[in-house]
Image (cartoon, rainbow, N blue to C red):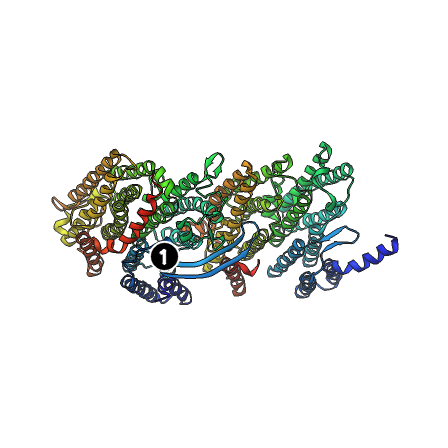
């Protein structure tokens, strides 16, 4: 293909990256407008508008295949997930923000652009660039609380991130150097028979683990979740995590290693360790945010199951992700309301003052995080267990069976720690050690919180809505 | 008539939903609505009993159920486990019908005894009605997924009912109850997924319990008896049987996984203890009947001795524990453990008299144990004390109370003429006549009756006979006899105990044909 044809091709492909383009455009307009006006409503409008345009394009995707000289791949999976990522980001407008409005929304938009490129990346360079774009945005966002604690966790996050991005880069280099191929779509298992290429692959995978907080690259998670601004945390728990998982899936599904390959066994082991650390870590927490952070590590371990297998499990993975996104955004939204009304988030000192509706919705979300019917978290867990069972039957791998058993036990433990919150709010309300002044939570916030619960309930009874 | 089961199942849930929109200031409305809901439920169960065809001789499990309702609920193409197909599938047979009737009776009694709940009335009755809907749902569901949904759905209301309205150590007891039961139900969930992948109905995977009972296994599926599928070198069906035994055994409760029960029973408010003892334990037993024995008859034959041993262990250990208790409510709680052991022994015998006995004993215990908890509640309401040593000679001060206590204690220890006797007798006859386990287990089970006589009679002697005496520390200004409201709860229960003791056929007529069919079905798996 000569240069002219290539250019024509690229120009015609540009329509396929309309989502990302509109987000970038929106981010730039937001930045410029923010220099002149500091009106929250106006900036929010621009934010919503660019997301709206992006979601319009994401719903309209009709042609699948490789674009921009093979650097991106549009598939059924990633076009569906880009809708989810954009959708969860839209929920951010529910959160009230008083300071750094321009910078915050700008960074959120760039993070989203990075994630959208990440899930579509087909060339190794694109992988690296998109992961870095997401990382830089997250480093700055995690710093936005401007407290001593926040600084500490942000520095921790930055250092960890820098190391893991170096690992990712080395890994990509090794993969390219030893296989000679620059595109994910041409990788396959036969190219990974030398020690060098296998090490490279493992490094790449570890680099991605950092984004998705998979053991042993999860250590930043509790610190950041505890002290970063809550709206940023809400996004961290959904967007980079899901996009990292899909990137991992893209890698592994092209390579198609069999279940008894040692790399796959290492990955499965890491996933199990993730579930275990998430569970054990959460048990001892008294800070709600830290507990949710460990819980979300555990959920990474569950979601992980769907991406490491060879089969494409579109529907189950999709359902789990949607449910997880709703639960996570909902939980952080309620935490945000409590914190904005200076309700202590340390559950031991919980203060309850006519917040029954909020607490009931919170309980619904937490119970759904555990996975108890009749909430859609149960359906998601049900898919997970059935999937693991099915995988065990087809592979007869004992590792997979242990994964299943560990997930089951983790669910029981999850009940214990997630239930601490309603436990302290409802059952121990008479032994509160100190009372905190709280203002009345706005009715709109109560309605939104209830809606999260109702949606989870609805998705249990009518899962067809999303699948 | 066509949607009768749905009405019984969903009506309380509907009322609970309506209650959500009533402001919590109207406190009296909630209990009246709850009473109305459970009364309607009882009436509808009466209609159900009247229209049930007792003579129906089933040819297959599919044909054994009456009042069947079946429609699609969830239909998803999932790719890996085939299409996920969940049905809204209800029906009753001779085993579940008496339990539905029992549930509506006990739930009604529970509402009456909740009459003096004073705090957070709205929340209490909403949770109570959710609980009652899901209890009925468990008994009528014929889709395993629906059954599991109801089975789990009752945990959350129960957690809050014990945790908010309970006694001093309520938060500990409620979380223990929740964790134990969830632990058990996850075992059930795993087996449920395994069964779903192995069972077909009309060519596709299905959760239908009737298809499981009839053994419509897919070829090459892991739980297909003909395939002898293995998991880590062990036969898959045996593992599934053990998992289910643990899952339902926790709910039953089976020694050694019974320890949640004394705590939960003691800390729960009286009406909730009534529902717990009367119905929740029966759901465990029903699960054993329907799923464990219905779907895995081959394993039931193979492991009969083990199951019966656990039953006997529960009988003896529960009985000895009851003997050692000083708290009246705790004594009753342990006596429940002991009695549910009889149900397990009856099941393990795999004889039609043993099965009938187990079912009858479930019903009879479902009437006696609520009454016993109500009796314990009576003394606790008046004195805020339940320790047996603190009372003596109550018969002279509260004669009516003493009379009812005697009636239900005698029913509990199996006095001929009262319902407890019939169940225990039939179970023991089954245990002696069976060929699947040895005599010695039956003989040990008989010992349980002696122990139960010991703890019941000793309690009567200590608390009711002798000179009237109440320990100094106890509030005694309120020691009056039963009020008319309390009598209204005890009289019908006592009548039922007497009636079932004299005419056991009132229950057995309903269940005979089903159990006969069940036993014939199992007999093809016997060596």
Q: Quadrant of the C terminus of chain A?
A: bottom right
In percent of width and height, residue B312 lies at 28, 38
Residue furthest to the top in view is: A195
| Residue nearest the viewer, comparing B161 with A40 | B161
Image height of A273 relative to A37, above or below: above
The image position of residue B396, as x and y in percent, is 12, 50
- Name the residue located 56 percent from the left edge and 49 percent from the top edge: B80
| Label 1 neighbour load within 10 Å: few <14, some 14-19, many 20+ | few
* Residue B267 makes an appearance in the image: no
In the depicted view, which residue is nearer to us: B400 or A432? Answer: B400
Does residue B233 appear left or right of residue B265 in this picture?
right
The answer to whether residue B44 is visible is yes
| Residue A335 horizontal/vertical position (percent) | 54, 54
Residue at the disc numbered 1? B63
Where on the picture, by quarter, is residue B118? Answer: bottom left
Q: Chain of mark 1?
A: B
Q: Nearer the viewer, residue B399 or B240?
A: B240
Element class at badge 1: helix
Q: Nearer the viewer, residue B519 or B152?
A: B519
* Count of numbered badges drawn on the protein: 1
Q: Is residue B428 above or below residue A337?
A: above
Position of residue A445 measured from the top left corner of the image (x, y, whole percent): 54, 62
In the rendered structure, the answer to whether residue A174 lies left or right of residue A435 reads right
């Amino acid at each position: 293909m000569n240069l002219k044809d290539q250019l024509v091709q690229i120009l015609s492909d540009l329509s396929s990256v309309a989502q990302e383009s509109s987000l970038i455009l929106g981010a730039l307009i937001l930045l410029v407008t923010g220099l002149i006006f500091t009106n929250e409503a106006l900036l929010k409008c621009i934010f919503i508008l660019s997301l709206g345009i992006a979601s319009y394009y994401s719903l309209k995707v009709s042609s699948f295949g490789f674009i921009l000289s093979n650097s991106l791949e549009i598939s059924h999976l990633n076009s569906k997930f880009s809708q989810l990522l954009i959708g969860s980001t839209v929920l951010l407008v529910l959160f009230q923000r008083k300071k750094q409005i321009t910078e915050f929304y700008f960074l959120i938009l760039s993070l989203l652009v990075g994630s959208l490129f990440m899930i579509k990346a087909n060339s190794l360079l694109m992988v690296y660039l998109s992961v870095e774009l997401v990382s830089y945005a997250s480093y700055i966002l995690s710093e936005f609380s401007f407290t001593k604690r926040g600084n500490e966790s942000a520095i921790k996050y930055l250092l960890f991130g820098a190391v893991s991005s170096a690992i990712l880069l080395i890994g990509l280099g090794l993969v390219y150097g030893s296989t000679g191929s620059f595109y994910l779509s041409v990788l396959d298992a036969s190219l990974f028979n030398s020690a060098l290429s296998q090490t490279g692959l493992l490094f790449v995978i570890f680099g991605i683990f950092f984004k998705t907080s998979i053991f042993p690259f999860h250590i930043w998670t509790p610190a950041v979740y505890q002290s970063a601004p809550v709206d940023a945390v809400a996004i961290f728990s959904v967007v980079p995590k899901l996009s990292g998982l899909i990137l991992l899936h893209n890698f592994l599904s092209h390579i198609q290693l069999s279940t008894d390959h040692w790399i796959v066994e290492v990955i499965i082991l890491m996933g199990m360790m993730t579930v275990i650390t998430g569970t054990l870590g959460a048990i001892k927490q008294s800070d709600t945010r830290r507990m949710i952070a460990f819980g979300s590590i555990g959920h990474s371990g569950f979601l992980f199951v769907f991406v490491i297998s060879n089969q494409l499990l579109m529907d189950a993975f999709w359902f789990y992700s949607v449910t997880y996104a709703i639960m996570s955004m909902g939980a952080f939204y309620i935490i945000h309301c409590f914190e904005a009304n200076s309700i202590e988030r340390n559950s031991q000192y919980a203060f309850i003052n006519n917040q029954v509706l909020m607490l009931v919705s919170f309980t619904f979300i937490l119970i759904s995080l555990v996975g108890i019917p009749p909430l859609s978290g149960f359906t998601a867990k049900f898919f997970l267990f059935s999937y693991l069972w099915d995988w065990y039957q087809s592979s007869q791998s004992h590792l997979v069976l242990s994964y299943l058993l560990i997930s089951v036990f983790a669910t029981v433990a999850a009940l214990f720690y997630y239930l601490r919150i309603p436990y302290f709010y409802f059952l121990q309300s008479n032994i509160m050690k100190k009372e905190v002044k709280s203002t009345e939570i706005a009715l709109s916030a109560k309605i939104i919180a209830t809606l999260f619960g109702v949606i989870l309930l609805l998705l249990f009874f009518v899962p067809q809505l999303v699948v | 008539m066509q949607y009768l089961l749905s009405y019984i199942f969903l009506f309380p849930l509907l009322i609970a939903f309506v209650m959500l929109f009533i402001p919590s200031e109207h406190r009296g409305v909630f209990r009246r609505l709850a009473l109305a809901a459970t009364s309607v439920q009882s009436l509808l169960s009466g209609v159900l009993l009247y229209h049930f065809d007792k003579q129906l001789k089933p040819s297959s499990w599919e044909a054994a159920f009456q009042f069947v309702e079946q429609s699609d609920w969830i239909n998803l193409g999932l790719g890996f486990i085939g299409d996920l197909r969940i049905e809204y599938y209800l029906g009753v047979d001779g085993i579940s019908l008496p339990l539905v009737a029992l549930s509506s009776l006990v739930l009604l009694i529970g509402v009456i005894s909740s009459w003096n709940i004073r705090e957070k009335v709205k929340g209490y009755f909403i949770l109570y009605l959710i609980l009652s809907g899901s209890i009925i749902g468990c008994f009528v569901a014929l889709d395993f997924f629906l059954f599991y949904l109801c089975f789990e759905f009752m945990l959350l209301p129960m957690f809050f009912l014990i945790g908010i309205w309970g006694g001093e150590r309520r938060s500990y007891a409620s979380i223990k109850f929740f964790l134990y039961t969830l632990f058990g139900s996850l075992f059930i969930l795993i087996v449920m997924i395994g069964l779903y992948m192995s069972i077909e109905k009309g060519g596709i995977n299905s959760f239908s319990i009737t298809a499981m009972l009839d053994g419509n296994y897919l070829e090459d599926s892991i739980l297909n008896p003909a395939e002898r599928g293995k998991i880590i070198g062990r036969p898959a069906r045996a593992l599934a049987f053990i998992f289910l035994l643990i899952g339902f055994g926790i709910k039953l409760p089976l020694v050694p996984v019974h320890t949640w029960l004394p705590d939960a029973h003691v800390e729960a408010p009286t009406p909730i203890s009534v529902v717990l003892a009367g119905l929740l334990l029966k759901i465990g037993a029903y699960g054993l009947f329907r799923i464990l024995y219905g779907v895995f008859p081959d394993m039931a034959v193979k492991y009969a001795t083990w199951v019966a041993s656990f039953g006997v262990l529960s009988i003896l250990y529960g009985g000895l524990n009851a003997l050692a208790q000083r708290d009246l409510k705790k004594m009753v709680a342990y006596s429940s453990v002991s009695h549910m052991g009889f149900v397990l022994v009856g099941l393990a015998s795999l004889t039609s008299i043993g099965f009938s006995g187990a079912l009858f004993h479930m019903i009879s215990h479902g009437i006696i144990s609520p009454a016993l908890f109500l009796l314990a509640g009576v003394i606790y309401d008046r004195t805020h004390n339940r320790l047996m040593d603190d009372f003596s000679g109550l018969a002279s001060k509260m004669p009516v109370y003493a009379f009812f206590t005697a009636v239900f204690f005698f029913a509990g220890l199996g006095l001929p003429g009262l319902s407890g006797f019939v169940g225990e007798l039939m179970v023991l006859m089954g245990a002696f006549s069976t060929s699947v386990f040895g005599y010695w287990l039956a003989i040990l089970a008989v010992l349980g009756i002696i122990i139960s006589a010991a703890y019941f009679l000793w309690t009567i002697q200590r608390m009711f006979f002798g000179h009237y005496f109440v320990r100094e520390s106890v509030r005694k200004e309120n020691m009056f006899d039963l009020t008319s409201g309390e009598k209204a709860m005890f009289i019908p229960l006592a009548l039922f105990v007497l009636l079932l003791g004299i005419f056991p056929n009132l229950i057995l007529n309903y269940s005979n044909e089903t159990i006969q069919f069940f036993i014939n079905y199992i007999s093809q798996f016997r060596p």
